[in-house]
Amino acid sequence: MRNKILYIIGAAALLLLARDMYLITGFPAERNQGAIFKIIFFHVPMAITALTCAMVAFVASILFLITKKFQYDALAVAVTEVGLAFLAGNLITGSIWGRVAWGIWWAWDARLTSALVCWLLYAGYLMLRNAIEEPTQRATFAAVFSIFAFIDVPIVIFSIKWWRTQHPQPVFWGGGSFPPDWSAVFGWQVLAVMLVGVVFTAVRLRQEQFQREIDSLRRMAHAL
Amino acid sequence: MMAFVRQVLVIMSKDLRAELRTKEAINASLSFALVVLLLFSFAFDPSEETTREISGGLLWIVFAFAGTLLLNRSFARELENDCLDALISAPISGAALFLGKALANYILVLAVELIALPLFGVFYNVRWTSQFWQLMMVIALATWGMTVTGTMFSALTVNIRLREVMLPILNFPILIPALLGAMQLTSALVAGKPITADNDAWLKMLIGFDVMYTAVSVVLVETVLVGG
């Protein structure tokens, strides 16, 4: 049953991505930037998905600390890894766009810097997990760190924003705008990338559950 | 309430006494600060005007590195003879233990900073005394932020592999906003410019950072100590 649902979500995500890709290729090039602007259809949905992952990880970490149920810990680590991958995708697509539009791969601009800091924060989370053997301790400490990291995200974003800004004013929530039919495609694209994120998380979650089963079987075998 | 304050002070004075008798962490931290100050003079020409402009940044990198050495020892010191288990099972709350340790660390890190600061002024020809009290305020605020997260992560990493490496890996990214604010303010202050409406947002951010992480640490520390 669970497999079927996963396949359906995955297929829906693939279909949506294919459809969006077809529509996006049909859009005319933007006046100043040319075709490279179309990267926004991947760049921004990945950022939104990564942020959603961070939020889910935060909630799952709190739930773990309250209930001590390991499925929340598994969820936290699964979404953190997936979110980290999407944030890396966001950074890379941003870098490609910057190479074409600014002529440089990287600028110490507010958004780039805060995305990189967030990436480092959550990479620290995974490193902390790797360094701890005992499952309860690992889950507890990782949850505490995840809460610390999530609180830091808004502070990082605002402080670095005061520091400097070179990023183009965001197309959404201030600055420019899309023609309506593009916005629709953009919305669908956010959904498609989110669904990919859901599938990744579910697969990763299952690995985590198998891992726990293997561990407990191993402990049983040792006890015999 | 009074009992809580007394417990905090007992832990704090215990840590300070233990450190002042051996002086191992504080000596290591101080000499490390000196070495980094020296290294920076090779990386940047110390007599140049541009170096003076980035001096606030240099200073905080020295403080952060030297502080990490002290913070690493905070809980690691208790591992010998299972002192940590005794402390956790003592009839005091985790919050009292945490705040006591954080205060002791705060005093030690501040001491190292206040010794490194005049040396820095001499080496790099920076007239850091021109806005003395405002600079002290910035140092006090940013150092508290550094110590409170550092003490928490010291407790988090005390029993795990790669302890010495994990603390800076966890602490520095979290600290980036606080360090950034401290660097901006310090650079302005050592250049003789007082804090104005232009940059007091950094000060507010530092205060917010301190309050928020102190609160979260006090709430979560019990979980960490018992869960560890």
Image: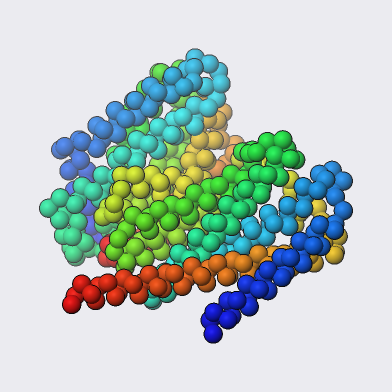
Can residue A104 be seen in this snapshot? yes
Callout count? 0
The residue nearer to you, when weighing A199 against B183, is A199
Residue B25 appears at what percent x and percent y?
24, 37
For the point 20% across and 72% down, which residue is it?
Answer: A222
Q: Is residue B14 left or right of residue B202?
A: left
Q: Is residue A190 left or right of residue B97?
A: right
Residue A11 higher or lower than A98, as above or below: below
Residue A112 appears at what percent x and percent y?
62, 45
Q: Is residue A202 left or right of residue B41?
A: right
Residue B38 higher or lower than A18, as above or below: above
Considering the image in quadrants, where does the C terminus of chain A appear? bottom left
Write down the quadrant of residue B213 in the picture: bottom left
For the point 70% across and 42% down, which residue is it?
Answer: A98
Residue B43 appears at what percent x and percent y?
46, 22
Residue A4 higher or lower than A155, as above or below: below
Write down the quadrant of residue A72 in the picture: bottom left
The residue nearer to you, when weighing A142 against A206, is A206
Residue B132 appears at what percent x and percent y?
45, 29
Can residue B12 be seen in this snapshot? no
